[in-house]
Amino acid sequence: IFSQYFLGGTGFSIKIEKISGTPLSRIEMEDVRMLYNGPDYSFDVVRIERFGCRYDFRSLFSGRPVILDLELDTPHVWIKPDSSGSNIIPFAGRPGSGASGSFEIANFKVMNGQVIYQSAGRADAAREIDLTGAVLSDSGGLRLSLTSGRGEIIGRKILLRRIHGDILRSGAAAGGAGGREWSGNALKLVDLFIELEKSSMTINGMIDPDSIYMDLNVDADPLEVEETARALGMEISHYGELQGVLDVRGVPEALRINGSVNGTFSGYALDDFNLEM
């Protein structure tokens, strides 16, 4: 069932060390591994110490499975690019790779997770990830609704205190403003609230994981300049704290930032200042 609805026709497979529970309503799995077997290399994309799932049994055969509760204990996720530079992600739905079916996860809980992201010349890792929320997939699109979350980006020394909001993925390439082409992995952020140690912001817009290009509207209240730069992997000499609405476009190495802000920036007091960077 997992292969049919979630991984059918892709280069991914699942291995499970132990399964227990009541098949008609709930199962538990231990030492779950999702493997990628591709033309470039093979590796574990996901490893989970314990996987708990309560579901509507009849829905599993309806073409739209309904998972009532899903728990992931100590999941580890690795994201790497293939030879073309595109990130290897389950359910990517690229031509010839198959697409995810329709399904619903009414409630999910992630405990003590870790994500490692590797690309040409760099790597990032987040640990101690705790998340709750829901997932809805329909006609190749995916909506992740977060109700709570926390974690730490260790290489950048960023502590994520809270996160909630919606993340959508259409699963199809599309054009955007200014002639920008978004890949099928592009994500739409809808009222995504993020609280760090010194900053909090609400984000709307698009981000493409393949290129790390972003086109975002950021409502900062407040935004601590040095902390935000570290979160984006930017090296800047500026400091301060800003409140306001900013348009952010580009990749982390070459961001264009425009907006009207108040606060302090590199020792200067700003009052309805038109910021262009």
Image (cartoon, helix red, strand yellow):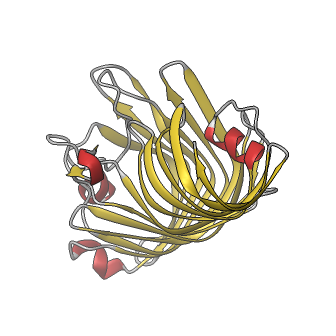
Q: Is residue 183 above or below residue 245?
A: above
Image quadrant assignment for residue 89: top left
* Quarter occupied by the N terminus: bottom left
Total residue callouts? 0
Horizontal placement of 190 versus 230: left or right?
A: left
Residue sticking out furthest to the left: 96
Q: Is residue 108 visible?
A: no
Nearer to us in this view, 176 or 35: 176
Q: Is residue 197 above or below residue 25?
A: above
Nearer to us in this view, 108 or 2: 108
**Residue at horizontal 21 percent and vertical 72 percent from the top:** 63
- What is the x, y in percent for residue 46? 50, 42
Horizontal placement of 117 versus 199: left or right?
A: left
Image quadrant assignment for residue 211: top left
Horizontal placement of 164 versus 87: left or right?
A: right
**Residue at horizontal 55 percent and vertical 72 percent from the top:** 133
**Residue at horizontal 35 percent and vertical 50 percent from the top:** 186
Q: Is residue 15 visible?
A: yes
